[in-house]
Amino acid sequence: MLHKKSVYVLGLLILLLINLPVVHAQAGSQYTIMIDGYHLNTDVSPMLQNDRLLVPFRSIMEALNASVTWYGRTGTVVAYKSNTTITLPVGQNHAYINHKLVRLDVASKIVNGRTLVPLRFVAESLNYDVSYDGVTKTVTISAKANAGKLNNREQQSRGIFGIDIGDTADIVKTVLGEPDRIDVTNLGFSWWVYNSNYARYLQVGIKADRVVTIYSNARDLTFNGLKIGSTVEDIGNKFAINDKPQFTIDNVQVELEPQPNTLVTVFDGVARIFYLDIHEDNTLTAVRLVTTEYLFKQKLFQSVRYRYSGNPEILNFTPSAELTSAMHTAYENQLLDLANSVRYRKGLSTLSWHQKTAEVAKSHSRDMLNANYFAHYSPNTGSPVQRLQQAGIRFRRAGENIAMGQSDAIEAHESLMNSLGHRKNILNKQFTHLGVGVAGDEETIYYTQDFISP
């Protein structure tokens, strides 16, 4: 059981390429591409179109030490390197550099299953010089002499799956498509949830058309060269981690103590929270990006000290009571998704929602809230098995997780995963269904997960 201080489907994946030009290329290339003295080999030959040399996007970007992600739902490829994000809708005569529109002389296209893009455009976008020898038909790409080593902030400015703090809602839709679900919070923002592919599970928090928070625990998560399983040393080599991060917001000087089993760094008004899996040698298991405003409002810390003068508005912030019930429903849905994301990561089948079991779980969370206790056994309804039986639910095996005091579903999930017994329930391959119930007041939220195999 977790008790925190009050202050504290196997399916077929089909990629639809709509209105994308598809051509086939012949083997062999008359062009040579050299990058910093090394010959670039590609599985699809470069081709000339309208005096522009097109090359395979992934090949060229990875040779330039950029990471690449393909979004089949929107027909978009995104590359990230340091402080540059290149978003390229395939078949269109435009791209985005750091989300700013750039017109292209020729459109990208699909060739033998590879996306070909204008070489000069992508290389120069990443601060490389490009030269061409017409006699030998050799393209030479080299780092600009004054490029130098990127400073710490530049290295740390990438987002997750092509989305970063401050992006507009339109950019999110361009890169990811419409969300699979929109979840309400009582804090002034909504979660856009992308759960159709748990390999890329993502939650994006939107307020007033802007991204204010992002979270993922997905298998394919990458962030500034980090991925699931990265070590504490890996994280420390990328970020200046603070034991007690400090920042100023709304004239309030804040010093906070991070939650257990997390690493935190704060700069430029954004916190980067790295969640560690204590049962996997304290390796990276999830990342959350959040503005300092919502870091503070959501109380995503163990304790906090602050100094201020006057009457700062942020200290008078009160969550919307009218939206609390809807937010609890959102947390219930998210706890299913979060469990399924990590199960998918572990090669397990995903869980299906079980409504009657969810009602039992909800009733138990409310019972704990109203009777002011925290336990699996209820003085009113008995044990978890008795509650399921009283509801007429037939099952071969069952398990229950409860948590209390975490500020949202993400924090509850990460805490449960670091508690061995609760973790075993979440990752139990014999469970097939899950019902979740959340209840709480202004001070404390109670979470109940009931797992069954009918």
Image (spheres, helix red, strand yellow):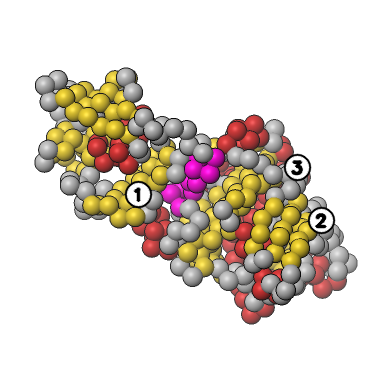
As displayed, is residue 266 above or below residue 51? below
Q: Mark 2 sits on what residue?
A: 3
Q: What residue is at 54 percent from the left and 61 percent from the top?
A: 212
Q: Mark 1 sits on what residue?
A: 97
Q: In which quarter of the image is the C terminus?
A: bottom right
Q: Would you say residue 95 is visible in this rendering?
A: yes
Q: What stretch is highlighted in magenta?
A: 152-163
As displayed, is residue 318 above or below residue 24? below
Q: Which amino acid does label 2 sit on?
A: His
- Say few, some or many: other residues with alpha carbon within 10 Å of mark 1 (under 14 / 14 to 19 / 20 or more): some
Is residue 348 rendered to the left or right of residue 261?
left
Q: What residue type is labelled 1?
A: Ile
Percent across and percent down for residue 400 are: 74, 54
- Say few, some or many: other residues with alpha carbon within 10 Å of mark 3 (under 14 / 14 to 19 / 20 or more): few
3D distance between C-alphas at marks 1 and 3: 44 Å
Percent across and percent down for residue 120 are: 24, 37
Name the front one of labels 1 and 2. Answer: 1
As displayed, is residue 155 above or below residue 76? above
Q: Mark 3 sits on what residue?
A: 420
3D distance between C-alphas at marks 1 and 2: 46 Å
